[in-house]
Amino acid sequence: MSHMSARRRWALLVTVGAGLLLITLDNSVLYTALPSLTEDLGASSSQALWIINAYPVVMAGLLLGAGTLGDRVGHRRMFVIGLVIFGAASLFAAFSTTPGMLIAARAVLACGAAAMMPATLALIRLTFHDARERNLAIAIWGSLSVVGAALGPIVGGTLLAHFWWGSVFLINVPVILVTLVAVGVVAPRNDPDPTKSWDLVSSLQALVGLVGAVLVIKELAHVPQHWPTIVVAALASAAGCTAFVRRQRRLAQPLLSFAIFRNRAFSGGVLAAVFSMFAIAGAQLVTTQRLQLVEGFSPLKAGLVVAVIALGSLPSTILGGAFLHVIGLRTLIAGGLGLAAAGVAVATAGVAWGGGLAVLVAGFALVGIGLGAAFSVASAAIMGNAPPREAGMAASVEEVSYEFGSLSAVALLGSLVTFLYSVTVALPADAPEAARDSLAGAIGVADGQPALLEAAFAAYDGAYVATMVTLAVALGAGALLTARVLRDYGPRTEAMTYADNH
């Protein structure tokens, strides 16, 4: 592929960035819309979680296959296909009339996102040939991921203040139309590689493994547990994951080459991506729900509070990418995750000890600064250590890392806060069962019973604090783990880390 002019390179970054913004926005746009959406559609608590999770679960399962397919048919073509699917699914989602329809629409949205997402990063990798310029471009790309995730609750809250919940999907359509036009103008020519193989079976095996694992987590957190479902899901997950690993080792051109993980910089980037998105998605989900249900915040106000994470991350994201060659991977990733853990601890202390909104916001600002540093170089570490001929596979691994972090946060932390509420809430003996299932259920049946509401709020706050402490511990563990993995990647090891030596 010939080198583009600088203007076209950066115009391409804006174009693929618009697609990325939509993808990440749709990951979190329902956090603030969930209470009103659940009420309008009559969704159960399990259906509500699947409305959120259908998107990242299906996307994560398809990403590996989509990236390798992009290597075969061309990443420009995959980006365009993804945009069209995403636009059609957005219309379907906006006008869904049942929880099942919306879950199905979110799954189709995920198919479009899975086609688009590796293509956005692969096109950057193939277009920006200078290592430092590419690091900056990928850092900007990473900041858009954070901005999209943070804008979701704000966009959702703003639209809900004026329109019905379906509007959070309709806004995708005009952006997609403009992006389709821009692709035709600034994107490089499609560059397929017919020698690359694509394996649908491997993609489906990964999907079965992920869906089964998420179902196990959700059912374990439900009170009472439905053990037949848990056993079947666990067996399906184990079978899918085992079959996937065995198949990759047999294939001449696997969807995922495990040998690439021997590169410590690559593995460190994967870990940074997982822990960063775990923290962002987890903190946003449980905090927006608490602010609306316990504090009585509007969806917009709740979204603005958690958006502080994104605002805090922007400076460190850009600076981290620009000065990576000076600071080094280890400091930015391990130090960033450690700072984020401290920020979560501050935010949690503000809730536990009555520090008020100011302490929560200050804690989230620290979380953002730390995660921005880690986020800024995670993608660069992954993409910079893969040969150009495997740009699609590397982009897929990078995207799976982000989606797995987000998905596991929703599954683990979203289920944990519900589980802890259910087992600790001390309700009157005659309280309806719905009040024990969830705080939203308790509010729905309270009907002038202040004692019931007080007990429910107290239990939820305790569950929220315990869940946030769990998040802080996970981030601390991530900081220690990445410091060990990246022990050889201190300041001024850029050539060692990012040289295009393939």
Image (spheres, rainbow, N blue to C red):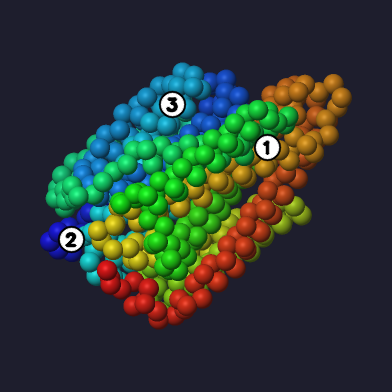
Q: What residue is rendered at 86% in x and 27% in y?
A: 428
Q: Residue at 28% across / 63% down in the picture?
A: 387
Q: Which residue is mark 2?
A: 7
- Determine if residue 366 is in view: no
Circle 3 residue? 104
Total marks in image: 3
Q: Position of residue 437 (x, y in %)?
A: 71, 29
Measure the alpha-carbon separation of dots 2 and 3. 40 Å
**Which residue is label 1 attached to?**
221
- Find residue 455 and name its label: none
Q: Position of residue 492 (x, y in %)?
A: 40, 81
The amino acid on which the numbered mark 2 sits, given as a three-letter code, is Arg
Report, in whole angstroms, how far the alpha carbon at label 1 lies from the one at label 2: 51 Å
Crowd rating for badge 3 (residues with CA inside 10 Å; few <14, some 14–19, many 20+): some
Which dot, 1 or 2, sits closer to the camera?
1
Quadrant containing the N terminus is bottom left
Task: Give the quadrant of residue 46.
Answer: top right
Q: Under tag 3, what secondary structure? A: helix
Q: Amino acid at mark 1?
A: Ala
Would residue 165 be visible to someone looking at this image?
A: yes
Q: Nearer the viewer, mark 2 or mark 3?
A: 3
Quarter placement of the C terminus: bottom left
Give how far across and how far down residue 487 sits, in percent: 51, 76
Left or right side of 123 for 217: right
- Graded by Cα atoms within 10 Å as few (under 14), some (14 to 19) or many (20 or more), the crowding at tag 2 reads few
Q: Earlier in the sequence, mark 2 or mark 3?
A: 2
